[in-house]
């Protein structure tokens, strides 16, 4: 026998089987639904698009080792399945199903003998995803003032103080939506200009500078919502194209808007959208239906969940407390007046019952997160410019008197990871 031995254990044949220190890791990432692996190797398994069944060597010898690692942290969505190829796995025959379903997991297995077969020697269940930097600042933008449609913006610092007007960049418009993306930037999109419904967007840098119009991708529409998901991406959804729709458009972590995705859930307009949990989003309420639709960390919209609380369109929603969200205010469909009620959204996307209102009752307002774990509702019907802060525990504060041009039918989003 010749060669260098690095952190090895002995096979029964007298040859040397490599452990972690001597494993060979290929540069390829496995993305298929099946894969066959060889002893002495480590493999990156990406189950973003599908589950993957990994077939182990059939002629295994004592000391053979294989390592499998969750490349994209998606084993909880699409499982890793082990086919032990005629050998036992932890003493159970090959007819048993062996799967791994924890995001971020890595698995090191070694062949023992014919009785126990393959045994995990390291079963690293990494359940916590890397924590994205928190959003510190926010921006309110566009909408309708007493003089008509505007492109005015107002920056919000990490203490929740709203700055005076910045006169407009981009086309004046209303009934649009906005969301954070790319960890520290934001995007305004769609809405109604003087020429009708549009699909244009405007990116916001991590210093709060609004870029000029980017002409549209996707169906022109207004009265929609948007939210961040997956830590660094965003999604626009629902709205009106003349009739209510459930189309969605994903936004990449570089701010590129994708073409339409055919709708899931009840078509509706004037819902609210927000991120929640570690990396998911939710669309909630709207007209004509009080339903919610959760968006996975891959941007997949789930089917309707029946609504909790009072049905109302033209509300707003934002994150608070790091992993929860709140939707509040909105239009009373019975009276046509504003409401000041709120509903907490848990870190698993469960909507709580109504909490009666704090602050001026209003609709067609906007909301965004700021300060790491706080939220802010602002502006709205009656051409208001009052704001209401949301604490880290989801408590809405009384009105803060207005700064900037009073307006409604606007949008807001968080940006910047710097306080």
Image: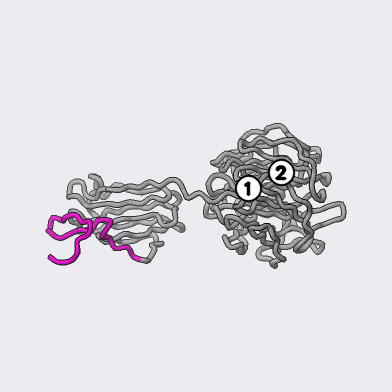
Q: State the CA–CA distance, disc 2 to disc 1.
A: 13 Å
Instruction: Tell me the quarter of the picture where residue 391 sits.
Output: top right
Looking at marks 2 and 1 on the same chain, the residue that comes earlier in the sequence is marked by 1
Q: Which quarter shows the N terminus?
A: bottom left
The circle on residue 159 is: none
Which residue corresponds to the image point at 64% horizontal and 33% vertical from the top-left?
353
Q: How many marks?
A: 2
* Residue 233: x %, y % from top left: 57, 56
In-image side of 20 versus 309 (left or right): left
Is residue 285 something that shows in the picture? no
Q: Which residue is tagged 1?
A: 274
Q: Residue furthest front?
A: 419
Q: Please say if 258 is above or below 377.
A: below
Instruction: Tell me the quarter of the picture where residue 141 sits.
Output: bottom right
Q: Residues within 10 Å of mark 1 (few under 14, many from 20)?
A: many
Q: Which residue is tagged 2?
A: 377
Which residue corresponds to the image point at 21% horizontal and 46% vertical from the top-left?
116
In-image side of 16 versus 55 (left or right): left
């Amino acid at each position: 026998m010749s060669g260098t031995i690095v952190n090895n254990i002995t096979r029964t044949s007298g040859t040397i089987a490599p452990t972690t220190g001597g494993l060979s890791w290929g540069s390829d990432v496995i993305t298929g639904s099946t894969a066959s692996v060889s002893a002495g190797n480590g493999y990156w398994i990406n189950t973003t698009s599908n589950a993957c069944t990994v077939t182990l060597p059939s002629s295994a010898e004592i000391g053979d080792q294989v390592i499998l690692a969750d490349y994209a942290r998606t084993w909880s969505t699409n499982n890793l399945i082990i086919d032990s190829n005629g050998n036992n796995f932890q003493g159970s025959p090959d007819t048993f199903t062996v799967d791994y379903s924890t995001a971020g997991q890595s698995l090191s297995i070694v062949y023992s003998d014919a009785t126990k077969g393959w045994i995990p020697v390291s079963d690293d269940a990494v359940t916590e995803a890397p924590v994205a930097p928190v959003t510190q600042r926010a921006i309110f933008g566009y909408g309708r003032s007493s003089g008509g449609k505007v492109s005015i913006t107002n920056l919000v610092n990490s203490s929740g103080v709203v700055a005076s007007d910045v006169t407009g960049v981009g086309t004046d418009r209303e009934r649009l939506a906005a969301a954070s993306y790319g960890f520290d930037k934001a995007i305004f999109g769609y809405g109604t200009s003087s020429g009708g419904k549009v699909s244009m967007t405007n990116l916001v840098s991590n210093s709060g500078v609004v870029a000029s119009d980017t002409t549209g991708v996707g169906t022109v529409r207004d009265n929609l919502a948007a939210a961040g998901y997956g830590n660094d991406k965003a999604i626009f959804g629902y709205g009106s194209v003349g009739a209510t729709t459930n189309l969605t458009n994903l936004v990449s972590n570089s701010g590129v808007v994708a073409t339409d995705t055919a709708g899931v859930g009840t078509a509706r307009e004037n819902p609210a959208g927000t991120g929640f949990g570690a990396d998911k989003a939710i669309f909630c309420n709207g007209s004509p239906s009080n339903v919610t639709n959760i968006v996975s960390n891959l941007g997949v919209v789930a089917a309707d969940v029946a609504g909790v609380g009072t049905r109302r369109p033209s509300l707003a929603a934002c994150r608070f407390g790091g992993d929860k969200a709140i939707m509040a205010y909105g239009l009373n469909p019975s009276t046509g007046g504003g409401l000041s009620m709120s509903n907490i959204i848990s870190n698993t996307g469960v909507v709580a019952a109504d909490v009666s209102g704090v602050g001026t009752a209003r609709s067609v307002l906007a909301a965004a997160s700021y300060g790491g774990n706080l939220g802010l509702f602002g502006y709205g019907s009656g051409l208001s410019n009052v704001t209401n802060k949301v604490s880290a525990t989801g408590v809405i504060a009384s009105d803060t008197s207005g700064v900037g041009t009073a307006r409604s039918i606007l949008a807001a989003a968080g940006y910047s990871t710097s306080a």
